[in-house]
Amino acid sequence: MKKKKIAVILLSFILCGSGGQLFAQRTEPAATLLPGRQLMADTTWVAETSGLESVFHVPTYYPCNPVVKADRPWELNVNGDPYAAPFSGGVWFDETDGKYKMWYSAGGGKRLGLITCYAESEDGKSWLKPVLDVVPGTNIVDTLEHDCMSVLLDKHETDASKRFKMFIVEFNSRFTVSMKLKYSPDGIHWSGPQALSGELYDRCAAYYDPFRGKYVLSLKTIDGPYGRARNYLAHQDPEMLVSLAHRVYDNQADKFIRYWFHADEDDPRNPHFPAIRPQIYNHEAMPYENLMLGYFTVWQGPENDACDSLMVQKRNEVLVGFSRDGFHWDRRFKQPFLPVCEDFHAWNAGNVQSVAGCPLIVGDSLYFYMSGRYNSKPKHDSNFATGLAMLRKDGFVSVRAGQEEGTLLTKPFRLDGAYLFVNADVCGKKSSLRVELLDESGQPVPGFTRRDCVVMKKVDSTKFLITWKGHSDVSSLKGKTVRVKFYLKEADLYSFWFSPWKTGESNGYTAGGGPGLSRTGRDTLVR
């Protein structure tokens, strides 16, 4: 097999090690697949592969970026520098009224921090800044001077007055910040602070982990040899969560706050300052299908004073990771997911950071929003704009077969569902995808063999129903222990899942939502 660029990793090497016998683990107890699409980014359900490689994919930046930039007087700071981007902030699709909604940071005429503004869209690309009544004649929704803030559209909240939650890191002085929690029924009119943290470092983030039913604070800390790193704090009550937060550094012991992680040696480095060791500038996460999708903003320098003297932005780029338990992360892919642009004059020439709520699911695509910064002024933290990037649905990682047929075999599991779907690109002239179901002993199930499978070919689909001759579904096998074996040739497989519905809803989590999806935050039938 030919060598690929660094983004391509041999899946058979990662998963199989020395590559044992095909059915060496026949006595392995059957598991139950978690609801949702089984992504090729996750290897926990794979037993072995042959002749496949794992390919890491990155989004494509929207050519009309930035989609939001400062064009209102209140979006400039006291020096006239433009700010209009979520600093975590939030971009969500609200299924209750069919709108894309954005909460972003703006200059607000402030000297130290930023204020919160609101925008909305019909398509996620063209954004309107509505005139609201909070600060009449503007789209300002909160004037608290902040370093950063996270806005959650909480689709799991039963109290309508708390449907929107704002975790805002407020400036107390030039050198100190603390977090406050606010609620809103509409994302426009916000309550007063309902909880207050102790003193924190800047650039913290908040999100909800539905698998554990807890809100999470990703807290900045300083870890001696590693510089900027992260601490973890989680609680089912968001008010208690904020109240428990305070500074903890250098791995100090705390009853509630745990040291989490720092940057890896092989994280990207600034090509102009290769001696600078990377650090973790920010981290936040979202539930997608049956995984937590993590965004890791990797700082590569230089420090702020050097940025000002050199008239450049600091280099931050966003990498992705995946987690089953919400705490330990698979970060083996080191290519930037949301990179800076090497064009000195680009809107994202420096300091690219992630946004809460992403991705949004728009048809066959995932929408990712991010902040980026121009180099057009010397101040390192100015010239703040918002961009959009798009990726195929489930498109983080694919397993790819070339001209020689490759196979992937799952671990045994109890089948729950009636229809088998795949997300795959099988549109080459000689490409094909077949699926076989095996029983507990590793033998093909009659009627569901490779020969019985209706071949998928000349199709590129994010939701394709697999059938066999005489079997349009797998309901006859429900509750039985099976394995799935995929046979690929000149094809990419991104995910598979079993659905109770012929329309293919996965029952997985839908991250920031999207048009036509359920307002429950899960991929279920919309009634």
Image: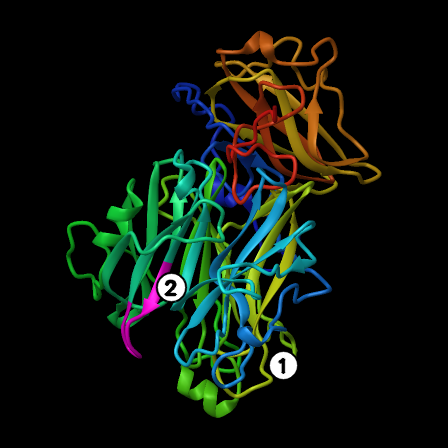
Q: Is residue 18 visible?
A: no
Does 139 sit left or right of 125 as displayed?
left
**What is the magenta range?**
168-177
Q: Amino acid at mark 2?
A: Ala
Tell which of 177 and 278 is nearer to you.
177
Whether the magenta-drawn stretch holds residue 178 is answered as no
In the image, residue 15 lies at what x, y percent?
A: 48, 40
In this rendering, position of residue 173 left or right of residue 351: left
**Residue 344: assigned label:** 1
| Residue in view at x 69 percent, y 33 percent | 488
**Percent x, y for residue 176?**
27, 73
Q: Position of residue 128 (x, y in %)?
A: 65, 59
Count neighbours of disc 1 (C-alpha within 10 A) and say few if under 14, some if 14 to 19, many if 20 or more.
some
Q: Which dot marks residue 263?
A: 2
**The C terminus, quarter of image:** top right
Mark 1 residue type = Phe
